[in-house]
Amino acid sequence: MVQWVRIMNLIATSPFENFNVSRITRDKPHLHKLSADDHLLMLELSYQLIRASGQQLQPFLQALSERHLPPSAVLAVHLKTPADNNAEVSFELINLSFPDEWIKEYINEGHFYHDPIKSYLQQNPGLDFCSWGEILGQVTNCKEILFRARLEHHQLTEGITLVERQPQSARASYFSFGGREIARDLRAISLLRFLLPFMDLVFRNGSAEVAPTPPLSTREKDILSWAMYGKTNGAIADALHISERTVKFHVQNIMRKLNASNRAQAVAIALQAGAIMP
């Protein structure tokens, strides 16, 4: 019960509790509040992911899609982009319901290099998701226009893609959900954005190349444990009787060690590695 309360505190103070619609539509911002039941659902699902192995991500995504999301096609991709442009991009795929013909075409025809959705997210590292319709409606490059035409052929013109990046490597996890309903369902997008770092962690743990989690110092564990409660740097500094600047230094060092892009991802990695206890 205690670990659920702690994760619930992290959810309650998460920036994902309020979802900014303008990040999809570019219109005036509106906030989407999740209900108390939604918070409990996020608690349950994040706890499942913390305890999951890499092989359990596919059944998790299947159950998530069937029970908690609008009807959608689901694809997860963990990829490594090499520094050498002449080297091949390596993919690890979980395909639940995208057309197999499109997946083969995407890989064999090199669509990866002309994918405007992937390019948009790479060019905007501050974003963790985008709506396909918004991006596809703005393409002007001939190859990207061809890419859009092929999506139309496979009836994949609306949907969303979420990305969790690994700052110190060329790896990233992309989770795509195709369908008109999910592209417009703010509750579903809010839920997925919260679960994103947890899903990425499970995906990485199922990879053939998983780096061991570096050891954390006692001070780093203390700070991360307070972060698990959703405490700010200032609150952690008060609790540990150190300066806020020192807390910030340790948080940045923790994220670097764990190859985490944000505090929530760092907490998820540390929990699954057993570095901190829920």
Image (spheres, rainbow, N blue to C red):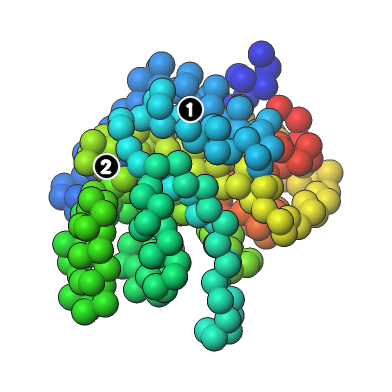
Which x, y percent locates residue 103? 41, 58
Neighbor class of circle 1 (other Cα within 10 Å; few <14, some 14-19, many 20+) is few
Which x, y percent locates residue 205? 68, 47
Occupied quadrant, residue 18:
top left
Residue for badge 2? 179
Which x, y percent locates residue 94? 52, 47
Going 40% across and 17% down the picture, which residue do you hit?
Answer: 36
Going 39% across and 65% down the picture, which residue do you hit?
Answer: 106
Q: Amino acid at mark 1?
A: Ala
Q: Amino acid at mark 2?
A: Gly
User: Marks 2 and 1, how far apart in space?
Assistant: 17 Å
Please tell me which residue lies in front, 189 or 80.
Answer: 80
Going 20% across and 71% down the picture, which residue do you hit?
Answer: 145
Which x, y percent locates residue 20? 29, 43
Task: Determine if residue 241 is in view.
Answer: no
Q: Earlier in the sequence, mark 2 or mark 1?
A: 1
Please tell me which residue lies in front, 270 or 100.
Answer: 100
Q: Is residue 38 above or below residue 95?
A: above
Mark number for residue 63? Answer: 1
Question: Element type at marker 2?
Answer: loop
